Image (cartoon, rainbow, N blue to C red):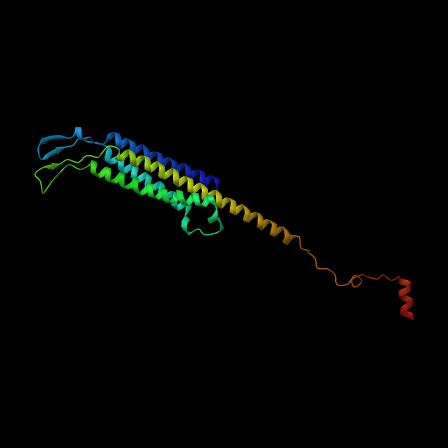
Amino acid sequence: MERKVIVICFVVGLLGLISAAAGFAAEAKRIKGSQVQFPSPDVCVYPRSPALGLGLTSAVALMIAQIIINVATGCICCKRGPHQGNSNWRLALICFIVSWFTFVVAFLLLLTGAALNDQHGEENMYFSYYYCYVVKPGVFAGAAVLSLASVVLGLIYYATLTSAKSINDSWGGSGAQVQGGIAMAQPQFPPQQGSQAAAPVFVHEDTYMRRQGA
C-alpha cells in the first residue's frame, strides 16, 4: 500500500509540475500586442507562437492529475463514519473542495487563453473597426499557479485520507488477531463426564481363573 501511495504522489506531482511549467512557458511565449502587425485597418497579422500548444498541454496534464487523485481517493463526501468528526478529515474535505475550485478556474483560464491566443481578428458589426485579440498578461501565469495549487491540495487530501484509512485498518486487524487468539485458547478436547468412567481395571490371571471356577 505504501508503494502505491508513493507512486501516485510521484505521478501526480510530476503532472502538476508539467502543467505549471507549460503554463509559465505559455505566458512567456504568448503573442503581445506589440507583435501584431496591421498591413491595413481591417487586417491583423499574428506571428507564430507555441502558446496554444503549451496552454493545451498544461490543461491536459492538470486534468489527468485531477482524475488520478479522485480515482485513487474515491468519493470523499460518500465516506461516512466516526472519522467525520476528526480534524484530519475536515482538513481533507476543505482541501478537496478548494482543489476542485482551483482546478476548474485554472482549466478554464488555460483553455480560454489558448483559444484567444489563436484568434486572428473579428470585424465589429456596429462600428467600423476591427478587433485584434491578444491574451492579457498574467492569464497563463495565474492559471499555472492555480494548477500547481490544485495538485498540491489534491495530494494533501489524498495523503490525509490514506493515512487515516491505514490507521483504521491497523486497528481492525489487531482486533481480529485478538479475537482469533481467544478462539484458539478454547479447549481442543472435550472434558470427560466422570473421572472413574474411563479408568481400566486389571485383574491377575489366577484371580480371574478362581472367579471363573466359582
Quadrant of the drawing holding the C terminus: bottom right
Q: In the orientation shown, which residue stands out farthest toward the bottom?
A: 214
In the image, residue 212 sits, relative to residue 26, either above or below, namely: below
Instruction: Determine which quarter of the picture holds residue 32.
Output: top left
In the image: residue 202, left or right of residue 146: right
Q: Can you give x and y, in whole percent of width and height, for residue 4 in the image?
A: 45, 41
Which residue is at the front of the view, 199 or 102?
Answer: 102
In the image, residue 206 sits, relative to residue 153, either above or below, namely: below
Which residue is at the front of the view, 117 or 205?
Answer: 117
Residue at x 29% of width, y 33% of height: 141
Q: Can you give x and y, in whole percent of width and height, for residue 50 in the image?
A: 23, 32
Q: In the orientation shown, which residue stands out farthest toward the top?
A: 34
Q: Can you give x and y, in whole percent of width and height, for residue 181 in the image?
A: 63, 50
Q: Can you give x and y, in whole percent of width and height, for residue 18 in the image?
A: 33, 34
In the image, residue 27 sits, relative to residue 172, either above or below, namely: above
Instruction: Determine which quarter of the picture holds residue 27.
Output: top left
Residue at x 37% of width, y 38% of height: 151
Residue at x 42% of width, y 38% of height: 9
In the image: residue 173, left or right of residue 94: right
Residue at x 48% of width, y 44% of height: 164
**How many numbered callouts?**
0
